[in-house]
């Protein structure tokens, strides 16, 4: 009887990186890549369609960042596990990934050596972190008396839709473009925009953009237009 393969969706906006991960995983007999996504919104849609066992998710994704995409994926398909892949190893990023339900977190620089093992581990229902992150988590848990690491405050008080609108604003999208991307009316976008500004107490686009960069919703390298 043939072995059932672990099905994987790769969500990574850099084509070269995604193709490299695909080539690497194709060498594994028990892992099958069933789909590829180049932005967070596509990752959510493909996960709903394909129901992969594991999604390998980059944090810095256009249109919808990897953390918000993870939250939406786990709401829609709870059986799917998400493994975060990131260039950032800061505690704040790791804690946010854990807060939205990710099962593991790998640093891109070391991912090639540990990716197959990480996929297998989280598919079994376990957690997996890059060694340096794992050591830090154990240290934090020890200091906290085993209570775990408290999640950092970020934009958790924003709804999923408000997070989507915030990211698109920060990426320089006008209200009309945002409405088209989210398939809602311009008036609804304006209402969400106003809500975001009220909740964050930030009342200009430049401030929202700085906030999005500071909290990892978008990368500082993203080309944005501040109007």
Image (cartoon, helix red, strand yellow):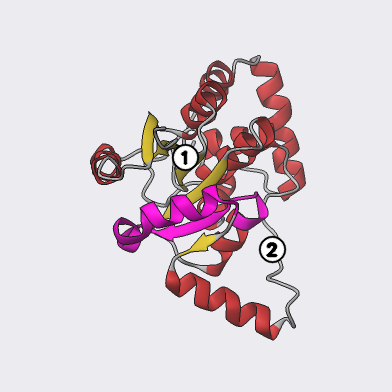
The residue depicted at 64 percent of the width and 16 percent of the height is 184
Q: Is label 1 in a helix, a strand or a loop? A: loop
Where residue 178 sits, quadrant-wise, is top right
The residue where tag 2 is placed is 151
Q: Is residue 54 above or below residue 42?
A: below
Q: Write the residue at 67% across / 55% down.
A: 99
Q: Where 84 sits versus 132, above or below?
A: above
Report the predominant secondary structure element of the magenta stretch: helix
Tell me, yes or no, whether the highlighted magenta stretch contains residue 107: yes
Instruction: Give the Cα separation between the discs numbered 2 and 1.
Output: 30 Å
- Residue drawn at (48%, 31%) of the image: 43
Residue at point 61%, 62% (across, down): 95
Give the SS element for disc 2: loop
**Image coordinates for residue 216, horizontal then vertical, percent:** 52, 53
Percent x, y for residue 225? 42, 37
Q: Quadrant of residue 44?
A: top right
Residue located beneath label 1 in the image? 226
Residue bounds of the magenta highlight: 98-125
Q: Nearer the viewer, residue 7 or 2?
A: 2
Q: Nearer the viewer, residue 152 or 195?
A: 152
Q: Local crowd at mark 1 within 10 Å, few (<14), some, or many (≥20)?
A: some
Within 10 angstroms of label 2, few (less than 14), some, or many (20 or more) residues?
Answer: some
Q: Is residue 179 above or below residue 162?
A: above
């Amino acid at each position: 009887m043939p072995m059932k393969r672990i099905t994987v969706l790769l969500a990574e906006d850099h084509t070269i990186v995604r193709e490299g991960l695909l080539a690497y995983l194709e060498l594994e007999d028990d892992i099958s890549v069933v789909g590829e996504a180049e932005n967070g919104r596509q990752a959510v849609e493909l996960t709903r369609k394909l129901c992969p066992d594991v999604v390998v998710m980059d944090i810095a994704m256009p249109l919808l960042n990897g953390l918000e995409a993870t939250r939406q994926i786990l709401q829609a398909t709870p059986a799917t596990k998400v493994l975060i892949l990131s260039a950032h190893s800061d505690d704040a990023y790791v804690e946010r990934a854990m807060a939205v339900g990710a099962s593991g977190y790998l640093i891109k620089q070391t991912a090639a050596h540990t990716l197959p093992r990480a996929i297998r581990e989280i598919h079994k229902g376990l957690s997996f972190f890059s060694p340096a992150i794992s050591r830090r988590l154990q240290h934090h848990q020890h200091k906290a008396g085993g209570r775990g690491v408290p999640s950092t405050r970020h934009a958790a008080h924003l709804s999923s839709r408000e997070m989507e609108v915030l990211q698109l604003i920060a990426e320089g999208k006008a209200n009309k473009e945002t409405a088209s991307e989210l398939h809602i009316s311009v008036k609804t976008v304006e209402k969400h925009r106003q809500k975001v500004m009220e909740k964050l107490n930030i009342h200009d686009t430049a401030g929202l953009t700085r906030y999005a960069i500071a909290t990892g919703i978008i990368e500082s390298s993203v080309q944005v237009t501040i109007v």
